[in-house]
Image (cartoon, rainbow, N blue to C red):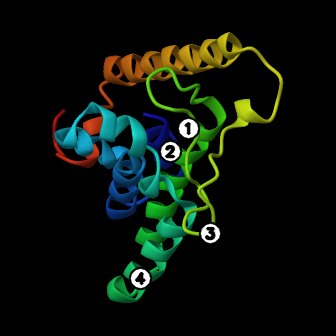
């Protein structure tokens, strides 16, 4: 929803808007590793798919193929937005905590909570507040008949 709101504010054209929203979800694609068991998922979630370096390389690779920078930049913005939110607010409720944002140069876990002395409950409160705000925005726009899913399936009105 956050990516949708940002794309809406930026007045992106449909292909870039789609890339932004899709890329904001893609870093969690590693959740499919659950098929290897919960221990594997807990160990490797938020690792390679949360690398700022890998997303930059992907954008640089895709750009010449598309002969444009708009979609790759939208991909990069969406993925970086996801990773930033994880770094700022992920408190390791289920998973181990930080993200490998600098892989392959470092496997150090990036997480704001590791660097400032604030109780975990404060991060959870901010995270829950953000969730409530985003769900409220979704309800508001649906009530106004401006559906977030229209960037994927147009003409729902």
SS at badge 4: helix
Front in this rendered view, residue 91 or 136: 91
SS at badge 3: loop
The tag earlier along the polypeptide, 3 or 1, is 1
According to the picture, the residue beneath numbered tag 1 turns out to be 86
Q: Please provide percent x and percent y for residue 104.
A: 55, 68
Measure how far apart labels 4 and 1 are at the Cα level.
25 Å
- Does 6 appear above or below 139? below
Mark 2 vs mark 3: give the one in front: 3
Measure how far apart labels 2 and 1 are at the Cα level.
6 Å
Mark 4 vs mark 3: give the one in front: 3
- Does 135 appear above or below 110? above
Q: Please provide percent x and percent y for residue 128.
A: 54, 14
Q: Are dots 2 and 4 in contact, CB under 8 Å?
A: no
Mark 3 vs mark 1: give the one in front: 3
Residue at x-position 25% and y-position 45%:
33
Question: For residue 99, which numbered disc appears in the image?
Answer: none
Residue at x-position 79% and y-position 19%:
118
Horizontal side of residue 105 vs 61, given as left or right = right
The tag earlier along the polypeptide, 2 or 4, is 4
According to the picture, the residue beneath numbered tag 2 turns out to be 82
Q: Are dots 2 and 1 in contact, CB under 8 Å?
A: yes
Q: Please provide percent x and percent y for residue 77.
A: 53, 57
According to the picture, the residue beneath numbered tag 3 turns out to be 105
According to the picture, the residue beneath numbered tag 4 turns out to be 61
The tag earlier along the polypeptide, 4 or 1, is 4
- Does 46 appear above or below 48? above
Residue at x-position 49% and y-position 36%:
2
């Amino acid at each position: 929803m956050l990516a949708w709101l940002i794309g809406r504010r930026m007045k992106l054209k449909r292909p870039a808007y789609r890339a932004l929203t899709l890329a904001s979800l893609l870093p969690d694609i590693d959740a499919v590793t659950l098929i290897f068991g919960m221990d594997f998922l807990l160990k490797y979630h938020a690792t390679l798919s949360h690398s700022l370096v890998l997303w930059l390389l992907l954008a640089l690779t895709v750009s010449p193929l598309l002969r444009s920078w708009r979609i790759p930049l939208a991909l990069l913005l969406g993925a970086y937005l996801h990773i930033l939110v994880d770094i700022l607010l992920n408190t390791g409720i289920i998973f181990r905590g930080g993200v490998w944002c600098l892989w392959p140069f470092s496997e150090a876990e990036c997480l704001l909570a590791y660097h400032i002395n604030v109780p975990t409950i404060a991060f959870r409160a901010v995270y829950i507040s953000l969730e409530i705000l985003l769900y409220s925005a979704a309800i508001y726009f649906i009530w106004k008949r401006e559906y977030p899913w229209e960037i994927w399936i147009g003409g729902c009105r």
